Image (cartoon, grey):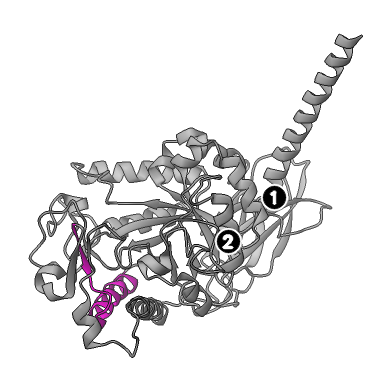
Amino acid sequence: MRIEIISRANRLVRCSLLFYLLTFLLLSLQAQPKREFRGAWIQAVNGQWVGMSTQQMQQTLRYQLNALQQMGANAIIFQVRPECDALYQSNIEPWSRFLTGQQGKAPNPYWDPLQWMIDECHARGMELHAWINPYRAKTKTTNVLSTTHISQTHPERVFPYDGLLVLNPGLQENRDYICSVVADIVKRYDVDGIHYDDYFYPYPAAGQTINDDAAYRANPNGISDRGDWRRHQVNLFVKQLYETVHDLKPWVKVGVSPFGIYRNKKNDPNGSQTNGLQNYDDLYADILLWVNNGWVDYNVPQIYWEIGNRAADYNELIHWWNRHASKRPLFIGEDIERTAKFNQQDRKMALYAECPNVEGTVLWYAKAAVDNVGGYATQLKQRYWRRQALQPLMPFITKTSPKKPRKVKAIWMSDDEQVLCWTPPRGSGWKREAVKYVVYRFLQGERVDIDNPQRIVAVTDDTFYRLPLGDGSQRYVYVVTALNRIHNESKPVKVKVRI
């Protein structure tokens, strides 16, 4: 009898575990949001293209983009300016050595990686955000600089630090210079965003001193504390960069990916329960000021630690940013390798669901995702990013939407091909112009709810959608909406279709 009771108890436990597992799986599929930023960083400085020909590099990038598209990504953050150089055609800065092996040397056969990536991403329905490193003028591993490099033409505007060269943030001419580079990109390329990372003043290194005494003496701005003065210089740049971009193209998003800790609680009562390097105190980057003043359009703190880390607990940090950075869309910079190492993908995704202000993810880094480290990409593809997602709303840029599509109807092109067609809505200007369309499908009699992402069957820049073949017995309601450049959605148009 005792054995039978234990056996029954074990069965009950197994059934309960199975029930909760199935419930969790169903919820994870149903809870996918309609709007979510699903990005990945593709960096140049890791040397992944060293020795590659143009064809090989394109082949590698195409393979990565295909894999990222298949797992559900909808945005790529592509490094185009690692050290005051260019992975694109520039008349301001020299070609990057991370592209050709020698700074200032053009690729041969010639190609423009930024333009190529824009074309490839847009063809896959992805956004392309051009990623720049604002102040870093030389990495530690670069030994030879082009004669046209800013450190060679204006050596007085950089300072050395721990093997780096850094554009002095305390000089207005450097802020103007960086903004001129960004303006050149925005004017000439159809980028969806400008993205900059966590390199402001350099990361502290033992025995190193920031040589900005002359800049401080020349223009102290009435600020007596050097730390406050440095933060002020960076604030001036962040505001100027934001205005530069939006004055040229208001729809181009400006994003920042700061280090994961703003301040530790021991230094600030509003800080996080952490014990690590700080944006505010060590990098002189006041991220919350930028968010609260609207000087960025999205914020991606790099929370690269694991849940339970003693110095910087992921659980503590994601909730801290969720509470303090809600005035602009908040995405999380996610370290794939560390997440996989501690087998925490599911636990971290559960934390996302607990944080209503978290509206997306950026994967560090693309190759780790493509390599499916720890099965991370498989989980995205099969569960968390299983359905397509639109970009998060940014009403502070504009609330205006395009008008709805016109002349929506199903047409038989042949005996075995039926196509849903429509005509673009009328409207001039980027706010009203339709650049993409969303197609939804509902069973006839089902409530039409375009807030339900499970009913999205396509997000396309075409003005048609090929309908699946059937025996003519199934009746559906198809719905088409229009999207503008920042994915504001029009009113729906419905049409009944028999398949």
Numbered range of the magenta stretch:
163-188
Which secondary structure lies at badge 2? Answer: helix
Distance from disc 2 to disc 1, alpha carbons, whole Å, reads 23 Å
Q: Local crowd at mark 1 within 10 Å, few (<14), some, or many (≥20)?
A: some
Looking at the image, is 17 positioned above or below residue 82? above
Quadrant of the image occupied by residue 326: bottom right
Would you call the spot at circle 2 few (<14 residues within 10 Å), some (14-19), or many (20 or more)?
Answer: some
Question: Which residue in the structure is indicated by mark 2?
Answer: 320
Give the residue furthest to the front.
Answer: 266
- 118 and 432: which one is in front? 118
Q: Which numbered dot is residue 31? A: 1
* Residue 210 vs residue 181, the one in the foreground: 210
Q: Position of residue 484 (x, y in %)?
A: 54, 69
Residue 462 on image: x %, y %: 52, 58
Q: In the image, 7: left or right of 90? A: right
Q: Name which residue lies at 25% across and 45% down.
A: 47
x and y, in percent, of residue 220 in the image: 29, 87
* Image point (26%, 44%), residue name: 57
Q: Is residue 437 visible?
A: no
**Magenta stretch secondary structure, dominant:** helix
Q: Amino acid at mark 1?
A: Ala
Quarter holding the N terminus?
top right
In the image, 340 versus 163, the foreground residue is 163
Q: Is residue 309 visible?
A: yes
